[in-house]
Each structure stands twice: as C-alpha cells, then as structure tokens.
C-alpha cells in the first residue's frame, strides 16, 4: 500500500507543483477566490465527479461516489491568501502587490486536487465515499467554514480531515494530537472614558491613561491568578491609544487585544474576569467604559477515532519516528474548528521546512515558503487515510 501511494504521489507531483505555483502567482483574498475555485472545480469536473460551486459563497464541493459505500469522509483545503507583501525571490512569486500565499493555502488546494486525481484512479480500492471541500476565507473572521456548513458541505459526511503545511517541522514528518489542537481565538475592544483637562490640574480630571494602565497591569493577573496553572490561556493587550498633546489629559483611551483558550470554561472565566477588572477599576476612579468582546473561531478539536486513522496511516508512510504524536496544542486559530465542532475530525500538520534550503520561516512571515516535496507527503497522508477509511 505504501509503495503504491508514494508511486502515485510522485507520478502527479510535477503537475501539482505547477498548479501550486500558478495559484501562488495569482493570490486571492477572503471570499474573492473565484479564479482559484475555478481551478479546483475544473479539476474535479475533469475527473467526472459531481461538483457543486458557489457553496459558502465561492467554495467548491466534489463527491467521489463509491458503489456500496455506506460511509462518507471529507477532505478539506482552504484557498485564500493573505493581505501581505511577499518578500521572496522565488520565480513563482506573487504577481499581485499586497497579496500573497504566505500560509500555504495554495499548496493545500493543489494537494487536494492531486489527492482527488489519485483517489479517482484508485476508486476500486475505496470503501468510503470521499467529499472534497475547497473553502474560501480561512484567514478572516468569521471564516468560510461556517458559510460552507450553512450551504450543506457537511451534509451526509461522517468524518472530516484537514492538513496544514508547517515549516517548523521538516519534510517527511507529520504532527497531531487528540483533543484540543488549536485555540479559540477571541478579540476585544475597550474604551475607558474619563474627563479630559489641563495636565497641570489633574485633580480636576478623570485620567483615562492612568486608569487604562492599571487595567492593563491587572489583566495580566488573569492568567496567573484566575486560570488553573495546568490549563492554558493567553491575554494580550495589543492596542493602547489615547491623547494628542503633552500638556492635555485626554478624555478617553481605547484598548484592543486577543484572548486564546483551549477550553470553554477557561474562556468564560477569562472573559468574565476582564469585565470584572474593567468595571472595578473604572468605578474606583469615576470613569465609564465600553467593553466589546468578539468570540472568534472555536477550538479545533481532534476526535480520537479520526486521530487513530491519521496516526496509523502516517506511521505506515513514514515510520513511527517521523510522526510527532501527541504534540502539545498550538494557540493559533483555524476555522477548521467549525467543522470539528460538528462532526468527528482530525487536523494534521505536515512538515514543510528544510533548513538546508533555508526554508524555515513560519506561516504569515513575508518570506514564508514551503519545500514543495512536502506536497508528496500531504497527498500521501490524505490518500492513505481515505484508502483505510
Ligand atoms: Ni493557514
């Protein structure tokens, strides 16, 4: 089985690299991924699959039907790029200023096309129906996944799998875990309103800068004093804006930040304590406040039976020593989470780094790239788990 899978992946490799480079040169953002979606839809269409377009606005869903199959598994790729200027010298560099595939979603789309071609060829060996999901807008909240689900992308699907290229691991390795794998990622905006005035007459003002500073300090006690030391949370205040003149106490200050958690109870606790501290500190100083808390993507949760399928497929392909399992959760966010909250799911990192080639920059870095041979391993894993499902 292993030899057959790798032989197929190598056979399709050059075509898949060409597709990836074409998408890389023509990045599209958010839901505006018509060109990329067209490439995916045409590829599935050419395989004779029933293809639905315009799912989740611009997503594509294709079904490979296997006679006698009672189960359906879904494989998901995201298609959108980032609003960042690419700073590489590769010949397939982005042709569009300010947009670039610096999270590898070009590779995800190309690999899923490769997997669709291989599984169509090996259809007689499949025991499950396979759904191919190409979704828009992974990078921007609220994400394309909820829109895809709304439009029926998960209807009749029993399990779903997603992969992400990850340059912090070398090519030829996979990494995953059971349970929470990626964080719930929330954001908040705060306005603390006092009473502005002359900087030399502070007793006639309510100084929102001093009050905000107290709040920022106090917020750092949440993780250390309200969250169980064995749980995980991040509270980062990343914006602090107020004042225009050196001799004026401003009337208000605005703050912004993010909360990352792996557990709903911890998330509630952090959110409540932010509110408590804000209210207590503002009240103590006669200030008022606004607190807008935006819940982001939920936790990406890996279900044990799906993880078992992934880990055993991965171990067959690259040996136990090259399957990093279980890795600790990562506090980044991913809208694959939305699928994993609905049906059994597993998300897997596919090693894409290569120190000798200087491919070491993390996703979202302006010089991010992948070692393209990682696409062989990405395809091999999805083909392998589809064949064993
Ligand atoms: Ni990504």
Image (cartoon, helix red, strand yellow):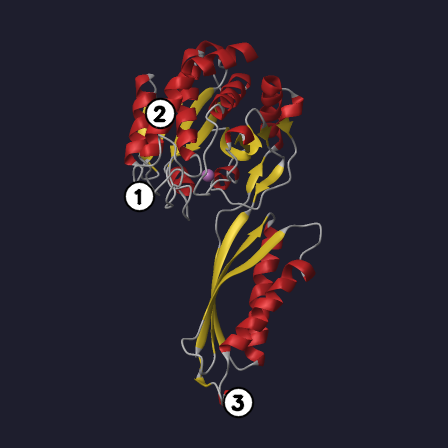
Percent x, y of residue 294: 47, 57
Give the secondary structure at mark 3.
helix
Q: Which mark is residue 203?
A: 3
Instruction: Determine which residue is flagged by label 2.
Output: 19
Asked where in the image residue 282 lies, by quadrant, the reply is: bottom right
**Front-most of residues 351 and 47:** 351
The circle drawn on residue 97 is 1
**Image location (x, y in percent) of residue 219:** 60, 65
**Nearest to N terminus: mark 3 or mark 2:** 2
Q: Is residue 318 visible?
A: yes
- Locate residue 315 relative to residue 54 in the image: left or right: right
Query: In the figure, 289 relative to 126: above or below?
Result: below
Q: Is residue 292 visible?
A: no
Residue at the image point whose x is 30% and y is 18% from the top: 46
Label whose residue precedes the other's in the sequence (3 or 1): 1
User: Label 1 to label 2, Cα distance in Å?
Assistant: 20 Å
**Residue drawn at (40%, 41%) of the image:** 87
Identify the secondary structure beneath mark 1. Answer: loop
């Amino acid at each position: 089985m292993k030899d057959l899978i790798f032989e197929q992946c190598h056979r399709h490799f050059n075509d898949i690299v060409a597709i990836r480079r074409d998408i890389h040169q023509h990045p599209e953002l958010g839901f505006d991924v018509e060109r990329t979606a067209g490439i995916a839809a045409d590829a599935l269409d050419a395989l004779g699959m029933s293809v639905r377009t315009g799912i989740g606005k611009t997503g594509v869903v294709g079904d490979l039907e296997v006679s006698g199959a009672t189960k359906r598994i879904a494989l998901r790729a995201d298609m959108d790029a980032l609003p960042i200027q690419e700073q590489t010298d590769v010949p397939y560099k982005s042709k569009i200023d300010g947009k670039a595939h610096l999270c590898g979603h070009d590779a995800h789309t190309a690999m899923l096309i490769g997997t669709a071609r291989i599984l169509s060829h090996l259809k007689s060996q499949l025991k499950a129906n396979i759904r191919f999901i190409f979704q828009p807008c992974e990078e921007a909240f609220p994400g394309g996944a909820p829109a895809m689900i709304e439009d029926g992308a998960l209807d009749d699907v029993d399990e779903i799998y997603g992969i992400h290229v990850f340059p912090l691991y070398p090519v030829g390795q996979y990494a995953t875990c059971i349970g929470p794998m990626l964080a719930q990622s929330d954001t908040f905006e705060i306005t603390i309103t006092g009473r502005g005035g002359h900087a030399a007459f502070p007793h006639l003002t309510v100084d929102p800068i001093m009050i905000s500073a107290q709040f920022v300090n106090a917020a750092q006690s949440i993780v250390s004093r309200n969250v169980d030391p064995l749980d995980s949370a991040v509270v980062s205040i990343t914006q602090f804006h107020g004042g225009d003149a050196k001799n004026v106490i401003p009337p208000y200050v605005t703050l912004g930040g993010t909360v990352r958690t792996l557990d709903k109870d911890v998330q509630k606790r952090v959110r409540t304590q932010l509110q408590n501290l804000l209210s207590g500190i503002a009240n103590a100083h006669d200030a008022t406040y606004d607190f807008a808390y935006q819940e982001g993507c939920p936790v990406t949760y890996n279900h044990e039976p799906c993880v078992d399928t992934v880990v055993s497929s991965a171990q067959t392909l690259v040996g136990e020593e090259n399957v990093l399992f279980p890795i600790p959760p990562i506090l980044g966010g991913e809208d694959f989470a939305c699928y994993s909250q609905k049906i059994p799911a597993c998300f897997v990192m596919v090693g894409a780094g290569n120190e000798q080639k200087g491919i070491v920059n993390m996703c979202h870095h302006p010089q991010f790239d992948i070692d393209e041979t990682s696409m062989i391993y990405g395809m091999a894993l999805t083909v392998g788990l589809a064949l064993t499902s």
